[in-house]
């Protein structure tokens, strides 16, 4: 099994984040993970919103989120656990993630510090 690629925090670029979150489904997945706190599995997100996301599309969405530096993924048996890197990202790019999720209207209550 191939190792998963996770960029170091100093290698994460804003254009990669913007690209990853430019897709509404990926933004919804990321917002759900950010609100979950403890992370979630790929299968838990198959039914997101009004439609079911095919496994192949879901896998690609997670790959884009992971390789852009937005999430960390860890294999646990047959499942893949995903967790956001919000704290690290907010330290490197203050307010960026919050602004993007707010623009989508998907800012989780846990991230709303106003």
Image (tube, grey):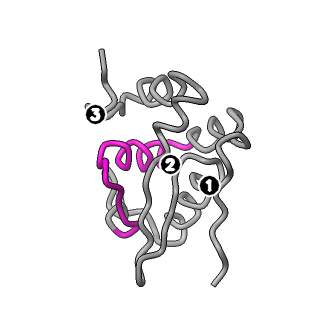
Q: Secondary structure at mark 1?
A: helix
What's the distance in space between the residues labelled 2 and 1, CA to CA? Answer: 8 Å
What's the distance in space between the residues labelled 1 and 3, CA to CA? Answer: 24 Å
Q: Secondary structure at mark 3?
A: helix
Disc number placed over residue 64 in the picture, else none: 1
In this view, 39 is above or below 96: below
Q: Earlier in the sequence, mark 1 or mark 3?
A: 1
Q: Number of labelled discs?
A: 3
Give me the residue at 67% from left, 79% from top: 2
Q: Is residue 112 magenta?
A: no
In this view, 93 is above or below 82: above
Q: Is residue 29 magenta?
A: yes
- Quadrant (top left, top right, bottom left, bottom right) of the C terminus: top left
Q: Are marks 2 and 1 in contact (CB under 8 Å)?
A: yes
Give me the residue at 32% from left, 61% from top: 47
**Closer to us: 99 or 104:** 99
In this view, 32 is above or below 13: below
- Which stretch did the figure color magenta? 23-43
Give me the residue at 29% from left, 49% from top: 36
- Side (left or right) of 11 relative to 20: right
Which of the 4 image quadrants contains residue 61?
bottom right
Nearer the viewer's eye, disc 2 or disc 3? 3
The residue indicated by pointer 3 is 110
Q: Residues within 10 Å of mark 3 (few under 14, many from 20)?
A: few
Which of the 4 image quadrants contains residue 81?
bottom left
The residue indicated by pointer 2 is 26
Q: Earlier in the sequence, mark 2 or mark 3?
A: 2
Give me the residue at 68% from left, 52% from top: 7
């Amino acid at each position: 099994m191939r190792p998963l690629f996770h960029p170091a925090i100093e290698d994460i670029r804003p254009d990669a984040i913007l690209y990853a979150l430019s897709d509404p489904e990926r933004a919804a997945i990321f917002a759900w993970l950010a609100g979950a706190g403890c992370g979630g599995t790929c299968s838990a997100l198959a039914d997101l919103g009004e439609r079911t996301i095919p496994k192949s599309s879901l896998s690609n969405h997670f790959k884009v989120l992971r390789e852009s530096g937005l999430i960390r993924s860890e294999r646990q048996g047959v499942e893949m656990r995903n967790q956001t890197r919000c704290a690290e990202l907010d330290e490197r790019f203050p307010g960026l993630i919050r602004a993007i999720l707010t623009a989508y209207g998907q800012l989780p209550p846990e991230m709303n510090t106003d």
